[in-house]
Image (cartoon, rainbow, N blue to C red):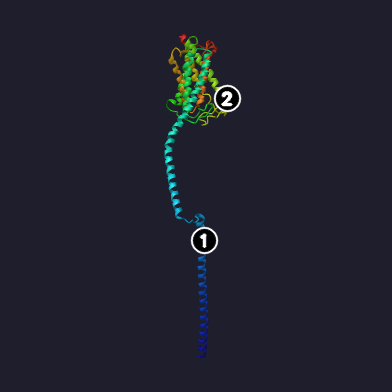
Amino acid sequence: MERKRDAHRHGAEHGEQHGGRRAVLHDADARMHVRMQVIDQVLERRVEQLRRQDREAREQHERPPQRFRPQDRECDHDGDERGSLELQAVLRAEAERQPLEREAEPRAEGSILAERCARGIDRARRLGRVLRIVNHSARPVNAARAPLALAALLVCLVCSISTAQAAGGPLGIDYRLHYDDSGIWSRSNQLIVLYGMMGTVGGGALWEGGEDRLGKTFWQSLDATVASGLASTALKYVFSRERPRQTSDPNKWFTGHGQSFPSGEVTVTSAMVTPFVLEYGPDHPAVYALEALPVYDALARMKTWGHWQTDVLAGFALGFAGGYFLHRPGSPFVWSIMPHGIKVGLKMEL
Protein backbone atom coordinates (compact mmCIF):
# COMPACT_ATOMS: atom_id res chain seq x y z
CA MET A 1 0.00 0.00 0.00
CA GLU A 2 2.81 2.33 0.88
CA ARG A 3 4.44 1.51 -2.41
CA LYS A 4 1.27 2.43 -4.30
CA ARG A 5 1.02 5.74 -2.41
CA ASP A 6 4.66 6.55 -3.22
CA ALA A 7 4.13 5.71 -6.89
CA HIS A 8 0.99 7.82 -7.01
CA ARG A 9 2.69 10.75 -5.30
CA HIS A 10 5.68 10.41 -7.59
CA GLY A 11 3.38 10.35 -10.69
CA ALA A 12 1.56 13.45 -9.48
CA GLU A 13 4.81 15.28 -8.95
CA HIS A 14 6.05 14.17 -12.37
CA GLY A 15 2.79 15.31 -13.97
CA GLU A 16 3.01 18.64 -12.22
CA GLN A 17 6.53 19.02 -13.53
CA HIS A 18 5.46 18.14 -17.13
CA GLY A 19 2.43 20.39 -16.90
CA GLY A 20 4.61 23.25 -15.76
CA ARG A 21 6.97 22.68 -18.64
CA ARG A 22 4.08 22.60 -21.12
CA ALA A 23 2.74 25.84 -19.70
CA VAL A 24 6.13 27.46 -19.93
CA LEU A 25 6.55 26.31 -23.59
CA HIS A 26 3.04 27.51 -24.42
CA ASP A 27 3.78 30.92 -22.93
CA ALA A 28 7.06 31.13 -24.86
CA ASP A 29 5.30 30.28 -28.12
CA ALA A 30 2.63 32.89 -27.45
CA ARG A 31 5.22 35.56 -26.77
CA MET A 32 7.16 34.57 -29.94
CA HIS A 33 3.99 34.74 -32.03
CA VAL A 34 3.19 38.19 -30.68
CA ARG A 35 6.67 39.38 -31.44
CA MET A 36 6.44 38.04 -35.01
CA GLN A 37 3.12 39.81 -35.50
CA VAL A 38 4.61 43.07 -34.25
CA ILE A 39 7.61 42.69 -36.54
CA ASP A 40 5.32 41.92 -39.50
CA GLN A 41 3.21 44.99 -38.79
CA VAL A 42 6.30 47.17 -38.49
CA LEU A 43 7.68 45.80 -41.75
CA GLU A 44 4.36 46.27 -43.54
CA ARG A 45 4.12 49.85 -42.33
CA ARG A 46 7.70 50.50 -43.45
CA VAL A 47 7.11 48.97 -46.86
CA GLU A 48 3.92 50.96 -47.30
CA GLN A 49 5.75 54.10 -46.26
CA LEU A 50 8.52 53.47 -48.76
CA ARG A 51 6.00 52.80 -51.52
CA ARG A 52 4.13 55.99 -50.72
CA GLN A 53 7.37 58.01 -50.72
CA ASP A 54 8.43 56.49 -54.05
CA ARG A 55 5.02 57.20 -55.61
CA GLU A 56 5.03 60.78 -54.39
CA ALA A 57 8.55 61.32 -55.67
CA ARG A 58 7.60 59.92 -59.10
CA GLU A 59 4.48 62.08 -59.30
CA GLN A 60 6.44 65.11 -58.23
CA HIS A 61 9.08 64.42 -60.89
CA GLU A 62 6.57 63.90 -63.70
CA ARG A 63 4.01 66.52 -62.80
CA PRO A 64 5.24 68.97 -60.25
CA PRO A 65 2.42 70.31 -58.17
CA GLN A 66 1.29 73.81 -58.96
CA ARG A 67 -1.04 76.14 -57.22
CA PHE A 68 -3.58 77.54 -59.63
CA ARG A 69 -5.17 80.87 -59.15
CA PRO A 70 -8.43 81.95 -60.77
CA GLN A 71 -6.60 84.27 -63.17
CA ASP A 72 -4.32 81.37 -64.12
CA ARG A 73 -7.34 79.29 -65.01
CA GLU A 74 -8.66 82.13 -67.19
CA CYS A 75 -5.28 82.35 -68.95
CA ASP A 76 -5.29 78.61 -69.53
CA HIS A 77 -8.78 78.82 -70.93
CA ASP A 78 -7.72 81.65 -73.27
CA GLY A 79 -4.65 79.64 -74.33
CA ASP A 80 -6.82 76.62 -75.10
CA GLU A 81 -9.09 78.79 -77.23
CA ARG A 82 -6.11 80.26 -79.08
CA GLY A 83 -4.67 76.79 -79.66
CA SER A 84 -8.01 75.58 -80.99
CA LEU A 85 -8.26 78.58 -83.31
CA GLU A 86 -4.70 78.02 -84.54
CA LEU A 87 -5.43 74.35 -85.18
CA GLN A 88 -8.56 75.26 -87.13
CA ALA A 89 -6.57 77.79 -89.16
CA VAL A 90 -3.90 75.18 -89.96
CA LEU A 91 -6.50 72.63 -91.02
CA ARG A 92 -8.25 75.24 -93.16
CA ALA A 93 -4.96 76.23 -94.81
CA GLU A 94 -4.11 72.58 -95.44
CA ALA A 95 -7.52 71.98 -97.02
CA GLU A 96 -7.03 74.99 -99.28
CA ARG A 97 -3.44 74.00 -100.17
CA GLN A 98 -4.20 70.47 -101.34
CA PRO A 99 -6.37 71.48 -104.35
CA LEU A 100 -3.76 74.05 -105.31
CA GLU A 101 -1.03 71.41 -105.19
CA ARG A 102 -3.17 69.08 -107.30
CA GLU A 103 -3.60 71.85 -109.83
CA ALA A 104 0.09 72.72 -109.74
CA GLU A 105 1.26 69.15 -110.36
CA PRO A 106 -0.13 68.95 -113.94
CA ARG A 107 1.26 72.41 -114.59
CA ALA A 108 4.70 71.33 -113.42
CA GLU A 109 4.53 68.16 -115.51
CA GLY A 110 3.33 70.17 -118.48
CA SER A 111 6.21 72.60 -118.13
CA ILE A 112 8.68 69.71 -117.95
CA LEU A 113 7.15 68.10 -121.03
CA ALA A 114 7.20 71.40 -122.87
CA GLU A 115 10.82 71.95 -121.95
CA ARG A 116 11.85 68.49 -123.11
CA CYS A 117 9.87 68.83 -126.34
CA ALA A 118 11.58 72.16 -126.95
CA ARG A 119 14.96 70.52 -126.44
CA GLY A 120 14.03 67.73 -128.85
CA ILE A 121 12.84 70.19 -131.47
CA ASP A 122 16.04 72.17 -131.05
CA ARG A 123 18.13 69.03 -131.60
CA ALA A 124 16.05 68.18 -134.67
CA ARG A 125 16.62 71.66 -136.06
CA ARG A 126 20.35 71.33 -135.55
CA LEU A 127 20.39 67.96 -137.32
CA GLY A 128 18.34 69.36 -140.18
CA ARG A 129 20.71 72.32 -140.44
CA VAL A 130 23.72 70.03 -140.73
CA LEU A 131 22.09 67.81 -143.34
CA ARG A 132 20.91 70.83 -145.29
CA ILE A 133 24.46 72.18 -145.45
CA VAL A 134 25.66 68.84 -146.80
CA ASN A 135 22.93 68.74 -149.43
CA HIS A 136 23.60 72.32 -150.56
CA SER A 137 27.16 71.39 -151.43
CA ALA A 138 26.18 68.71 -153.99
CA ARG A 139 22.62 69.07 -155.29
CA PRO A 140 19.52 71.28 -155.13
CA VAL A 141 17.69 71.33 -151.83
CA ASN A 142 14.43 70.11 -153.34
CA ALA A 143 15.66 66.54 -153.77
CA ALA A 144 16.65 66.18 -150.12
CA ARG A 145 14.01 68.33 -148.46
CA ALA A 146 11.63 65.48 -147.74
CA PRO A 147 14.25 63.08 -146.30
CA LEU A 148 15.44 65.85 -144.03
CA ALA A 149 11.89 66.52 -142.92
CA LEU A 150 11.37 62.83 -142.23
CA ALA A 151 14.63 62.67 -140.31
CA ALA A 152 13.54 65.64 -138.22
CA LEU A 153 10.16 63.99 -137.72
CA LEU A 154 11.81 60.81 -136.47
CA VAL A 155 13.96 62.81 -134.04
CA CYS A 156 10.94 64.70 -132.73
CA LEU A 157 8.97 61.45 -132.42
CA VAL A 158 11.68 59.70 -130.45
CA CYS A 159 12.26 62.75 -128.25
CA SER A 160 8.55 63.19 -127.56
CA ILE A 161 8.27 59.52 -126.56
CA SER A 162 11.14 60.01 -124.12
CA THR A 163 9.81 63.18 -122.46
CA ALA A 164 7.40 61.41 -120.11
CA GLN A 165 10.09 59.33 -118.41
CA ALA A 166 13.32 59.92 -116.57
CA ALA A 167 15.89 59.43 -119.34
CA GLY A 168 19.65 59.26 -119.78
CA GLY A 169 22.17 58.53 -122.49
CA PRO A 170 24.23 61.00 -124.53
CA LEU A 171 21.21 63.13 -125.49
CA GLY A 172 19.21 62.59 -122.30
CA ILE A 173 16.38 60.77 -124.13
CA ASP A 174 17.22 57.10 -123.57
CA TYR A 175 14.97 54.90 -121.45
CA ARG A 176 13.23 51.54 -121.77
CA LEU A 177 9.79 51.63 -123.38
CA HIS A 178 6.98 49.38 -122.21
CA TYR A 179 7.93 45.94 -123.51
CA ASP A 180 5.70 44.73 -126.34
CA ASP A 181 6.58 41.75 -128.54
CA SER A 182 3.13 41.21 -130.00
CA GLY A 183 1.19 42.33 -133.04
CA ILE A 184 3.01 44.56 -135.46
CA TRP A 185 5.88 45.00 -132.97
CA SER A 186 6.69 41.29 -132.77
CA ARG A 187 10.19 40.19 -133.69
CA SER A 188 8.89 37.91 -136.44
CA ASN A 189 7.21 40.83 -138.20
CA GLN A 190 10.39 42.87 -137.92
CA LEU A 191 12.37 40.13 -139.63
CA ILE A 192 9.72 39.76 -142.34
CA VAL A 193 10.05 43.47 -143.16
CA LEU A 194 13.87 43.37 -143.06
CA TYR A 195 14.31 40.23 -145.17
CA GLY A 196 11.58 41.35 -147.56
CA MET A 197 13.40 44.63 -148.17
CA MET A 198 16.75 42.89 -148.62
CA GLY A 199 15.23 40.39 -151.03
CA THR A 200 13.54 43.16 -152.99
CA VAL A 201 16.75 45.18 -153.32
CA GLY A 202 18.92 42.17 -154.19
CA GLY A 203 16.40 40.66 -156.59
CA GLY A 204 15.69 44.03 -158.21
CA ALA A 205 19.40 44.66 -158.74
CA LEU A 206 19.90 41.26 -160.40
CA TRP A 207 16.77 41.67 -162.51
CA GLU A 208 17.25 45.24 -163.68
CA GLY A 209 21.03 45.35 -164.08
CA GLY A 210 22.95 48.61 -163.76
CA GLU A 211 22.33 50.27 -167.09
CA ASP A 212 18.99 52.03 -166.70
CA ARG A 213 17.81 54.44 -164.00
CA LEU A 214 15.87 51.95 -161.90
CA GLY A 215 18.58 49.30 -162.05
CA LYS A 216 21.27 51.81 -161.11
CA THR A 217 19.19 52.91 -158.13
CA PHE A 218 18.81 49.30 -157.01
CA TRP A 219 22.58 48.85 -157.14
CA GLN A 220 23.15 52.11 -155.30
CA SER A 221 20.78 50.88 -152.63
CA LEU A 222 22.78 47.65 -152.44
CA ASP A 223 26.03 49.64 -152.15
CA ALA A 224 24.60 51.73 -149.33
CA THR A 225 23.30 48.63 -147.53
CA VAL A 226 26.66 46.87 -147.61
CA ALA A 227 28.72 49.95 -146.66
CA SER A 228 26.38 51.11 -143.88
CA GLY A 229 25.97 47.58 -142.52
CA LEU A 230 29.74 47.11 -142.26
CA ALA A 231 30.12 50.52 -140.60
CA SER A 232 27.38 49.83 -138.03
CA THR A 233 28.88 46.42 -137.20
CA ALA A 234 32.30 47.99 -136.60
CA LEU A 235 30.77 50.72 -134.41
CA LYS A 236 28.93 48.11 -132.35
CA TYR A 237 32.23 46.52 -131.34
CA VAL A 238 33.85 49.91 -130.73
CA PHE A 239 31.17 51.25 -128.38
CA SER A 240 29.95 47.87 -127.00
CA ARG A 241 26.89 49.41 -125.41
CA GLU A 242 24.48 47.16 -123.53
CA ARG A 243 20.97 46.70 -124.88
CA PRO A 244 17.81 47.57 -122.91
CA ARG A 245 17.12 43.87 -122.40
CA GLN A 246 20.51 43.58 -120.68
CA THR A 247 20.25 46.59 -118.37
CA SER A 248 17.92 49.42 -117.42
CA ASP A 249 20.82 51.90 -117.37
CA PRO A 250 21.35 53.56 -120.79
CA ASN A 251 24.83 54.73 -119.80
CA LYS A 252 26.50 51.30 -119.97
CA TRP A 253 29.13 51.87 -122.70
CA PHE A 254 32.35 49.98 -123.50
CA THR A 255 31.28 46.92 -121.54
CA GLY A 256 32.87 44.44 -123.93
CA HIS A 257 29.70 42.38 -124.42
CA GLY A 258 27.07 44.84 -125.68
CA GLN A 259 26.18 45.60 -129.31
CA SER A 260 23.41 48.14 -129.02
CA PHE A 261 24.90 51.28 -130.62
CA PRO A 262 24.06 51.93 -133.40
CA SER A 263 21.05 49.91 -134.53
CA GLY A 264 22.18 47.74 -137.44
CA GLU A 265 18.68 47.00 -138.71
CA VAL A 266 17.62 50.63 -138.73
CA THR A 267 20.91 51.48 -140.47
CA VAL A 268 20.28 48.91 -143.20
CA THR A 269 16.62 49.79 -143.76
CA SER A 270 17.44 53.50 -143.93
CA ALA A 271 20.30 52.85 -146.35
CA MET A 272 18.06 50.76 -148.63
CA VAL A 273 15.32 53.35 -149.05
CA THR A 274 17.45 56.53 -149.20
CA PRO A 275 18.67 56.16 -152.84
CA PHE A 276 15.09 55.61 -154.06
CA VAL A 277 13.85 58.62 -152.09
CA LEU A 278 16.61 60.84 -153.45
CA GLU A 279 16.20 59.58 -157.01
CA TYR A 280 12.42 59.42 -157.39
CA GLY A 281 11.10 61.57 -154.56
CA PRO A 282 11.06 64.92 -156.37
CA ASP A 283 9.19 63.39 -159.36
CA HIS A 284 6.98 60.96 -157.44
CA PRO A 285 6.24 62.24 -153.90
CA ALA A 286 4.62 58.94 -152.95
CA VAL A 287 8.10 57.44 -152.84
CA TYR A 288 8.74 59.38 -149.64
CA ALA A 289 6.43 56.91 -147.92
CA LEU A 290 9.33 54.43 -148.02
CA GLU A 291 10.81 56.31 -145.07
CA ALA A 292 8.04 54.78 -142.95
CA LEU A 293 9.93 51.46 -143.10
CA PRO A 294 12.98 52.55 -141.06
CA VAL A 295 10.69 54.53 -138.75
CA TYR A 296 8.65 51.38 -138.09
CA ASP A 297 11.78 49.33 -137.55
CA ALA A 298 13.14 51.93 -135.12
CA LEU A 299 9.97 51.92 -133.01
CA ALA A 300 9.74 48.11 -133.11
CA ARG A 301 13.35 47.68 -131.97
CA MET A 302 12.73 50.01 -129.03
CA LYS A 303 9.47 48.23 -128.16
CA THR A 304 11.19 44.84 -127.97
CA TRP A 305 14.09 46.25 -125.90
CA GLY A 306 16.58 45.73 -128.71
CA HIS A 307 17.84 49.32 -128.82
CA TRP A 308 17.81 52.66 -127.04
CA GLN A 309 16.46 55.84 -128.61
CA THR A 310 19.90 57.16 -129.55
CA ASP A 311 20.75 53.78 -131.11
CA VAL A 312 17.96 54.04 -133.67
CA LEU A 313 18.64 57.73 -134.33
CA ALA A 314 22.30 56.98 -134.99
CA GLY A 315 21.32 54.04 -137.21
CA PHE A 316 18.92 56.21 -139.21
CA ALA A 317 21.56 58.91 -139.65
CA LEU A 318 24.25 56.39 -140.63
CA GLY A 319 22.00 54.68 -143.18
CA PHE A 320 20.88 58.01 -144.63
CA ALA A 321 24.50 59.19 -144.92
CA GLY A 322 25.51 55.95 -146.66
CA GLY A 323 22.59 56.17 -149.10
CA TYR A 324 23.25 59.84 -149.75
CA PHE A 325 26.96 59.58 -150.50
CA LEU A 326 26.61 56.42 -152.61
CA HIS A 327 23.76 57.90 -154.64
CA ARG A 328 26.23 59.47 -157.08
CA PRO A 329 26.90 59.64 -160.80
CA GLY A 330 28.83 56.78 -162.31
CA SER A 331 28.58 53.04 -161.95
CA PRO A 332 27.52 51.55 -158.62
CA PHE A 333 30.47 50.15 -156.71
CA VAL A 334 29.30 46.56 -156.13
CA TRP A 335 28.05 46.27 -159.71
CA SER A 336 31.37 47.51 -161.12
CA ILE A 337 33.53 45.03 -159.18
CA MET A 338 31.42 41.95 -159.89
CA PRO A 339 33.08 39.26 -162.05
CA HIS A 340 31.98 39.38 -165.66
CA GLY A 341 30.87 35.76 -165.50
CA ILE A 342 27.95 36.67 -163.24
CA LYS A 343 24.86 37.55 -165.21
CA VAL A 344 22.97 40.68 -164.15
CA GLY A 345 20.10 42.37 -165.86
CA LEU A 346 18.13 39.15 -166.25
CA LYS A 347 15.21 40.91 -167.86
CA MET A 348 17.46 41.73 -170.83
CA GLU A 349 18.37 38.09 -171.24
CA LEU A 350 14.76 36.98 -171.54
Instruction: Work out whether residue 228 can be spotted.
Output: yes
Percent x, y of residue 264 = 51, 22
Residue at 43% from the left image edge and 14% from the top image edge: 285
* Residue 233 position by quadrant: top right
Q: Residue beneath label 2, please? A: 238
* Residue 258 position by quadrant: top right
User: Who is closer to the viewer here, 64 or 150?
Assistant: 64
**Whole-number angstrom distance, CA of label 1 to CA of label 2:** 85 Å
Amino acid type, residue under disc 2 in the picture: Val
Instruction: Work out whether residue 264 can be spotted.
Output: no
* Sequence-first disc among 1 and 2: 1
295 vs 205: above or below: below
Badge 2 density bin: few <14, some 14–19, many ≥20, Cα 10 Å: some
Residue at 44% from the left image edge and 47% from the top image edge: 82
Dots 1, 2 in contact, CB < 8 A: no
215 vs 296: above or below: above
Tag of residue 316: none
Q: Secondary structure at mark 2?
A: helix
Q: Residue furthest bottom?
A: 1
Q: Secondary structure at mark 1?
A: helix
User: Who is closer to the viewer here, 280 or 103?
Assistant: 103
Percent x, y of residue 117 = 47, 26
User: Who is closer to the viewer here, 40 or 217?
Assistant: 40
Image quadrant in which the C terminus is located: top left
Percent x, y of residue 265 = 50, 22
Q: Residue beneath label 1, please? A: 53
